[in-house]
Each structure stands twice: as C-alpha cells, then as structure tokens.
Amino acid sequence: MISVADYQRYDGLGLAALVRAGEVTPTELLEAAIACAERINPQINAIVIPMHEIARERARGHLVGPFAGVPFLIKDVVQDYAGVPTTAGSRAIDYVPPTHAEITERFLRSGVVIFGKTNTPELALKGITEPARWGPTRNPWDLERTPGGSSGGAAAAVAAGIVPMAGANDGGGSIRIPAACCGLFGLRPSRGRVPLGPRIGEVWEGASSDLVVSRSVRDSAAMLDAVHGADVGAPFEIRPPQRPYLDELQQPPGRLRIAFSTRSPIGTEVHAECVRAVIDAARLLEDLGHHVEEAEPEIDGERLAQDFLTMYMGQVAADIAHWAAVAGARETDFEPDTRALGLLGRTLPAHEYILARRRWNDYARALGRFHERYSLYMTPTLAQPPVRIGELAPPRWLRIAQSLVLAAGAGRFLHRSGVVEQLARENLAKVPFTQLANLTGTPAMSVPLHWTADGLPVGVQFIARFGGEDVLLRLAAQLEQARPWAQRRPAL
C-alpha cells in the first residue's frame, strides 16, 4: 500500500516508475487518489463528476504507456469520455458522448487511470471557475480566492495534491491562467499540435489547444509526447518535433535572446507583484546566461482584444445553437452572462466576424517578425494575483441591464454603441497577456517563479515562435532546476 502523504510526494512519471518497479499497483495508487479527493475535494470543489467504478475496473486491467497506473482527471469540456456526461459547466447541458474524444483516447493510451471530471465555468468562457451548475472551485493556496479558469478545477486538483497532473485546454489562457493562480506549470501547445476530434475540428477557430496542468515540467513534456500528432480528418498537420519532448529537457537551452514587457497591451493596470515577478525572472535569466531586454511586438493590443472578443461572442452563439440541436439545451437554462454574449454573437454582422478573423494573420506575421530577433517573449501571465471568489461576478445593476437587453433583443443596437470595445477592455483587464498566443497559434507557458508576501503564486508567461515547444521546455527545465517550485505546497 501507499499512503496519501507518500502518493503526493511524486509527480506522474515518478508514480509510473513505482508501478513499473512493482512497488505499488495501479489499484493502490487509485485508492490513494480517491482517499485524497474525498478528504480535500469538499474544500475546493475541483471534481464535479466522479468516475470511481470506471477507474477501478481500468486499474485492474493491463496498462501500458509512460504513465501506466497514474491517477488522472479530465476537464468537463471537449475531453469527452464515452458514456460519461459532458456538461461543460452548464445547467443546460447533459450530453452523453457515444465515443471518447481523441484527446481522451490518447490520454488513456498513455496509461493514466481517469477517475473524474473537473469543474469549469459555463462553456469554458471565463478566467474564473464559478459556474451556477456546480458552484465555485476554490484555490488551495487561499480558499477565498479563485484558482483561475477555465481549467480551474484541474489546476485546483493538482495544486491540492489530488493528482500530479490533469487534463486542461486553453482558448484564451485557460491552461496558463489557472497554472499561474495555483503555482503550477502550464504549457499551451501550438495550434494543431494536439488533436481535438472526432466531434470537433478546431475549437474557437483554432485558438484553443489541449494538454495538462502539472507540478513538474517533465510530466507536461512526457504527456505532450504521448498525445501530439494529427488525428484522422484533422484540418492540418503541424511539423513533428525533431526528438521526444522529454528528451529536450536534457538539452541546454543555449543563450537565448528574450524580450520582456510588463505593460498591459490594452493599457490597463498591472499589479506590482506581477511586474515584480517579471523583473525578478529577467534577473534570473541573465544570471543563467541569457540576453534579456525590454521590447514588444508591433501589435495593436486593443484591436487584438476586440478581435478576440468578436470570435468569443460568435462562438458562444454557435455553442448555444449547437447544444440546443445536439442535447436539447434550452437557451433560458444558460447563465445570463452566456445568454448576453450569445445575443451579441447572433447579431454580429458576418463580414465583421470575417474581418476580425483575417486580422489574426496580421498578428501572427508581426509576432513572427518579432521572433526573428528574439527567441522568446516574456510577460506576466496575469495582470494581478488570484482574485477573491465572486469578485468578478456582474454587479446587480449589470444583471438587471442584461435581463432588459435579453428581453428586448437589442443586440444590433449594442454593437453600434461600442459595447465590444468596452467589454474587451473590462473583461480582459485582469488577463490581457494570454490571448496573443491563442490568436497567433503559438505555444506559450506559464512558469511559477514568484509568490507574493502573503503566499499567493504569480506566474510568468513565455511565448515562443510557432512550433517552438522544444525551446520552451528546455528553458522551463532550466528554470525548474534553478528555482524549484514543486516542494511549495498549500497547507490544506
């Protein structure tokens, strides 16, 4: 047997090594994970759909792969598991998929034992995890604060020690944001690196990528090795890596040219702790032999934010229509925020959507030119440390206004009023740095290099050229060795 305390000491590859050595069985690991979840989950509300009996049956079978026998959780959106409801955090949805999503299938081929699904905001739409259906997920570092979103349940479960890593996805920062809030490593792969079929071709016009949040860099690297590569009928295939990503961790990163900025691209305030995290990281990078200087790509950040929100609104409208057709969802069962975004999406002129989507190319070209001069671009992951639960909920006056707008169906009027520009500024003020990687399709990571005086984690973001996961992982391994973070654990 393995105790919960011993179970929590290992990362995923460490647990798999114990299984291979015969020191512990997959069933014993699973029971330790379940015991851990039963003790901790009532405090943090990270797991919303348990799958214990499915997991017990799998743990008794023959498991192969780099993570054979390792307990694992998947996110309750996109990562469908055959026969288990997908709710996408919504009271309107109870969809039971007939087949696994390809990403879930590949997780399983890696040998993991999936024993539950994690909480997410409705339709994975927010950088906090407070859905009306399941209630808020709480940050293990401070139970009054958010773990971020939309992979907030995944990050909270990993930070709390329930699992060493968990499935996540990132359409506007949803791997990096919760990684930053919870003191974890979070890598968002390049567009097309990880498959999303068969039910879906591209999520959010290709802005979204799937992988994990993890305590160790090597777990993310090994899982990327296990899941990357196009599936049948994928929109396109990205060039495969030259060597396994896990092997990249043994390669020195060389002397990188790293640009950094602490300025919000939409001109909003950046908390002093987030600025301090980047400045401190810059000093560390220089000590490690890298060239670091302040510079930014020539991109209109406010325009990019508006174009991101244009896509976001259109996708919400399409998702509401999709779930009505596929699962009989009623629009009135969605949360008011979601319905208001859906109304804006339905009344958005098609040519404006297309023009906004075309500008993604401009951002990608500008960032590509920037990466001709710099290996990486470093920023804060977030513009402030984790906010308190409920802090970002709409005020009462706004909820009343939303209900009036929905009743009147005044979407076209709102578009003409400049509401998109205002929404972009207000909704992304806390998270203005992450959308650049999503719209350009480039890989990016959040690294837990800083903690505030009162013990809250603060992430530092690095963005690489398209296909540059190898550069990110080599640097992440160097940073992990120079300033280890896995031993820092919340006192739950």
Image: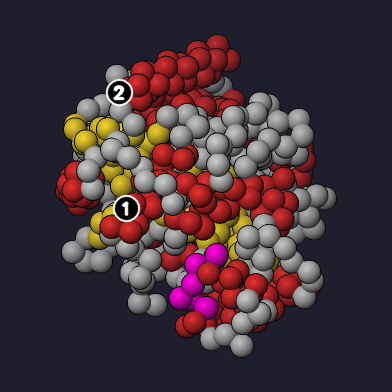
| Residue 129 in view | no
Neighbours of disc 1 within 10 Å: few (<14), some (14-19), many (20+): many
**Left or right of 111: which side holds 437?**
left
Percent of width and height locating residue 225 = 59, 48
Q: x%, y% of residue 420?
A: 41, 26
Which quarter of the rendering shows the C terminus? bottom left
* Residue 373, disc: 2
Residue plotted at (24% across, 40% down): 290
Question: As drawn, is 287 to the left or to the right of 30?
Answer: left
Instruction: Tell me the chief SS of the magenta region.
Output: helix
Task: Identify the magenta region.
Answer: 7-13
Q: Mark 2 is on which residue type?
A: Arg
The mark nearer the N terminus, 2 or 1, is 2
Q: Does 434 sit above or below residue 305?
A: below
Q: Quadrant of the N terminus?
A: bottom right
Q: Which mark is residue 479?
A: 1
Residue 228's disc is none
Against 449, residue 317 (above or below) is above
